[in-house]
Image (cartoon, rainbow, N blue to C red):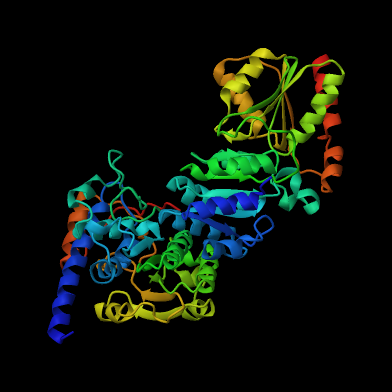
Amino acid sequence: MSTMAVRSENADLEALALRVREHIVRMAAGGGCFIGASLSCADLLVYLYSRVLRVSPATVSDPSRDYLLLSKGHDVPALYGTLAELGFVARERLENHLKTSDSIYWHPNRAVPGVEFHSGSLGHLLAVGVGIALDVKMSSGPSRVFVVVGDGELDEGSVWEALLVASAKKLDNLVIVVDRNEFQANVATEDLVPLEPLDDKFKAFGASVCTIDGHDYGDLRSAFASIPRTPGRPSVIIARTVRGKGLPSLERRADRWFVAFSPDEVKALLGELHGSARAVLTSETKVVR
Amino acid sequence: MASYEDVLCTLAEQDSRIVVMTAENRAAIRNLPARLGPRFIDVGICEQTMIGAAAGLALRGRVPVCHALATFLTLRAFEFIRTDVGIGRLPVKLVGAVPGFLSEANGPAHQAIEDIALMRAIPGVQIVCPADEAELAAAMPAVLASDAPCYVRFNAGPPAVVHRAPFQMGQAEVLSEGNDVSLLTYGLMLREVEVARRILEAKGVKPRVVNLRTLRPIDVRAILRAAAESKLLVTVEDHLRIGGLYSMVCELLVESGVRARVLPVALEDRWFRPGLLADVLLYEKFDGESIAARVTKALNA
C-alpha cells in the first residue's frame, strides 16, 4: 500500500470508529451499558469487520464466511455499532437498545443479524469457536474464526482448556484476539490476578502470539495481514487497548465499568468525542458485579 | 441385537451431520475412531470445552453426540449445556455414562443422582432413560432425528424385559395392566421393578408396570390413567427424590387436580453406599424383593 492509500484508509477507519463510538455513547443513555469495555475494543472491531473478515450483510448465513465471536459479551455496543454502520442492522434499530419490544440488550443476541452466537457468561466462546473451526477443517472450508476475549475473562479456566484443545487439533483457522485493556470489572487485572507475562502463557499453550497496539491501524494491518501466523497453530493477537478509549473523561477509570448517563451527559460526551472539553459527569457508576 | 456402538455408527454412516464426541470416555464407543475417522472427536478430559465445541459444530449444521461420565457431563459442564446448548436450542445430544447406581463402587463424586433434576431445569432439553441396551439402541434414531438438545441417561445393560412396543418419544411402555398398584419407573430400575411385580403377583396383588422410557417429554396420559385406575402409585428411580420422576408425577397430579397416593422409592437426600451393583441394590433396598416389601407395606397401611 502506498503512503497515500494508507493515510486515506486510516482516515476512513477513524471516521467509522468515531461513528461507532457515538453509537456506544448513545447506548449508555438511560439504562446504560458497559461503556469502558465497549470503547476499548471499538477500533479492533471496526478494523476486523471492515478490513479482515470475509463477511457482509449479504453473507451472514454463507457457510464460507469468516466468523467473529464476541466472547466478552458485555462490550456488545461496539459490535452493534459496527454492524449498524456496515449495514448488517439498521442504524435506527439501535435506538431500541434495552427495549423489550426488540432484542438488543446488554449482551449479544444471535437474533440480531451478524451476531454469530450469544454470550455473556465469560469463557464460553473460545470453546464454541473451537467447534466451528473443527467443522471448517472437517469440511475443508475457507472460513476463519476470530474470537474476541477480554483480558479479565482470562481468569476463566475454560479459556485455557479450549486453547489446549485448539492447539491439539492444530486449528490454525482460529484467531484469538485479546482486548488487553488491563481491567477486570472493578480493578486492574495486574492488581487482582496478574496475567503477565501473557504472551508467554499463550505460547506455552501452543499458540502463535503477537502483541500490538489495538488502537493503531498500522499495527492492526500487520497483525492480521497473514492468518495463520504459523501454519498448524492457533493465532493469538494481544491487542493492548485503553478502557474508555476516545473519551478522556472515562479513560482508564476503574469506576467507569457500567454507566448510565443522563441526556445532558450524553450530549457532552458526544462533544468530547469530537474534541470538545471533557464532559462533566455526575452519574454514579452503576455497579453490577 | 445391535449394540449401542453399532447403531450409532450406522446412523452416522447414513447421516453425515452426525459427529461423535467424547471427553476421553470411550468405553461405549471404542471402535468408532477407526470407523468414523475425523467425525470422531476426542477433546481430552474437558467436558466444558466438549460442550462448547459441540455447540460450535451444531451451529455449522452438525449433530454432535457427546459422551462423558454422567456426573461430569451434567455437573462440570452444566453451565455450558444450559448457556450454549440450551439457550441456543441446538441439537446437541448428551450421553451420560454410568448414571445412578451404575457408578457402582466409584464413590459419591461419580454418582449422577441429580442428573435428571438438572437436565429438566434447562428449557427444551429432552431426557431419554433406556432400561437396557435394546431400548437404548431403539431410542437412538429418534434421539438423533430430533432438533432438540437431548440427555440420554446411558444404560447398555442386559435385557430388563422383552420390549414389544416400538420406541417413541413421550410414550411409556405399559408392561402389565394391573389395577392394585402402578409401579412407575425408568432406566436401570425397570429390571428390579419386574422382579417386584412377579413377587407381588405371587401374593395375589395385580400390579401395573409403566416403563416411562422418556422423562421429557413424559407420558402424561399413562401417568394420569395409572392414577385413576390404581389404588397406589409407586415411583422407582435411582435418583434423588427431589427433581426426578417422583417430583414430576406429583407436579402433574397437582396440576391436573388429581388426588392419588404416591410412594417414592428414591434416594433420600444423600449419596448411596458405594459397592458392586448387586450389593448396592441390596444395601440401599432397591432390589426387587425390597421394593415388593415396601409396596406391600404401603398397600396394607
Q: Residue drawn 56% across and 58% down?
A: B21
Residue A68 drawn above or below residue B79: below
Count of residue discs:
0
Residue A273 drawn above or below residue A8: above
Query: Where residue B216 appears, x then y in whole percent?
Result: 56, 35
Q: Residue furthest bottom?
A: A3
Residue nearer the viewer, B65 or A74: B65
Q: Residue drawn 35% across and 65% down?
A: A253
Query: Where residue A234 appears, x then y in whole percent?
Result: 45, 74
Q: Is residue A108 visible?
A: yes
Residue B33 drawn above or below residue A28: below
Q: Is residue A120 visible?
A: no
| Quadrant for the C terminus of chain B in the image | top right
Residue A125, located in which quarter of the rendered image? Answer: bottom left
Residue nearer the viewer, A24 or A233: A233
| Quadrant for the N terminus of chain B in the image | top right
Query: Where residue B16 appears, x then y in whole percent?
Result: 47, 55
Residue A48, located in which quarter of the rendered image? Answer: bottom left
Query: Where residue B298 appears, x then y in whole percent?
Result: 80, 19
Residue A107 drawn above or below residue A145: above
Q: From the viewer's perspective, is A261 left or right of B200?
A: left
